[in-house]
Image (tube, grey):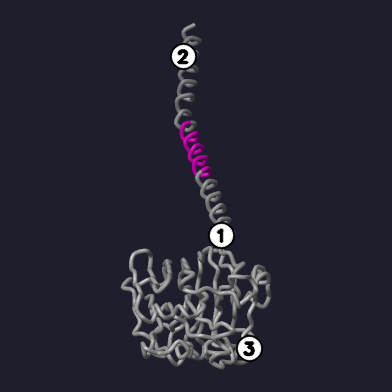
Amino acid sequence: MLIKKNYKLLCLAFMLVLIFSSVPTLTAQASVTSKHLLFASLNKNEDTALVSSARKKRYKLPKIDLSHWKVTIPEGEGKGGAISVEPPAILDYATNETLKPYMYNDSLIGALTFYAYPSNATTANTKYSRSELREQMEPGNDNVNWTFKDGGNLKAKIAMGDVSKDEDGKYHKVIILQIHGRLTNEQKALIGQKDNNAPPILKIYWDKGKIRVKTKVLKYDGVSSEGILHEEAWGDDEGYSFKEEVGFKKFTVEIDVSDGKMVVSLNNNEYVTYDNLSIKRWSVFENYFKAGNYLQTRDEGAFAKVNFFDLKVTH
């Protein structure tokens, strides 16, 4: 009986040892399993976030209404032979094989990008090539424009995408915004000019990372009402550079014109105002806005990309 009793006690003790020795293993396995589940959940969430982010970037498109703009590109032949595309054809720029190399969506950053290089195709009154929009108040018609008395406002969010350097290692200049003057048909006939071209009253440059503004001034304040129509009556002012360096970051430019006055601002922080006699007498001309990439060089191998994130005009 004693042997039987001792045998039962030994069996019970052995079973207890087995049970307690397995508890840490089970606990460890449970811990490892829960960690795997946690990491799997985190990885799944991270993957989902990356996919979601990629989708957002892939479909991020600029919201720019092109129904009142035509574009001129560095494609075509010779001086005055640059190709232009007007509304409504410009609205299909994303699938237009002629436009695609020079005007396209960069969906990774949500911009409308303008590319230019020194090609043989230029407009009639310049040696430089451009990929640039020209305002058309009436789509498809260059003959309907506005005066300073009518007023106008342009707001644009822009960033320089990429630009070449000259032999001294300095970035090439690019005109990104303009107000261009235009003669009416009657004014053209009066002075015997072959086209309707008048000087640009405003040029805004990206110049080595800064925004620079240039306007026209009368060479002689007392010029006659007919003489003022000639391009020779106008010269360039000294120019004005905003203090802030924008570099390759996004920046906002606003141009506001009214009768006898023009105000240009950068990032709603710096302003320059023009209300001199030359601006007041500019009211004789019609005008239109321009926006894009007007590369100011003929250097071999030069190029520029300008990104527009927003562009709005009101009158």
Mark closest to the chain's N terminus, 2 or 1: 2
Residue 19, percent from left and from top: 48, 24
Decide which of 190, 279 is in the foreground and name it.
Answer: 190
- Magenta segment boundaries in residue numbering: 27-41
Whether residue 2 sits left or right of residue 266 in the image: it is: right
User: Mark 3 and mark 2: span between their CA atoms?
Assistant: 108 Å
Name the quadrant containing residue 242: bottom left
Numbered circle sitting on residue 60: 1
Residue 180, relative to residue 119: is it above or below? above
Whether residue 137 sits left or right of residue 12 in the image: it is: right
Identify the residue position indicated by label 3 in the image. 81
Q: Is residue 91 visible?
A: yes
Identify the residue position indicated by label 2 in the image. 9
Dot 3 surroundings within 10 Å: few (below 14), some, or many (20 or more)? some
Residue at the image position 51 percent from the left and 68 percent from the top: 308
Residue at the image position 68 percent from the left and 73 percent from the top: 96
Query: SS at mark 2?
Result: helix
Residue at the image position 56 percent from the left and 52 percent from the top: 52
Residue 284, percent from left and from top: 47, 80
Name the quadrant containing residue 209: bottom left
User: Mark 1 and mark 3: span between their CA atoms?
Assistant: 34 Å
* 3 or 2: mark nearer the eye: 3
User: Mark 2 and mark 1: span between their CA atoms?
Assistant: 76 Å
Residue 312, percent from left and from top: 51, 65
Report if the CB atoms under discs 3 and 2 are less than 8 Å apart. Answer: no
- Secondary structure mostly seen in the magenta stretch: helix
Amino acid of disc 2: Leu
Residue 287, relative to residue 13: is it above or below? below
Residue 264, percent from left and from top: 39, 71
Amino acid of disc 1: Lys
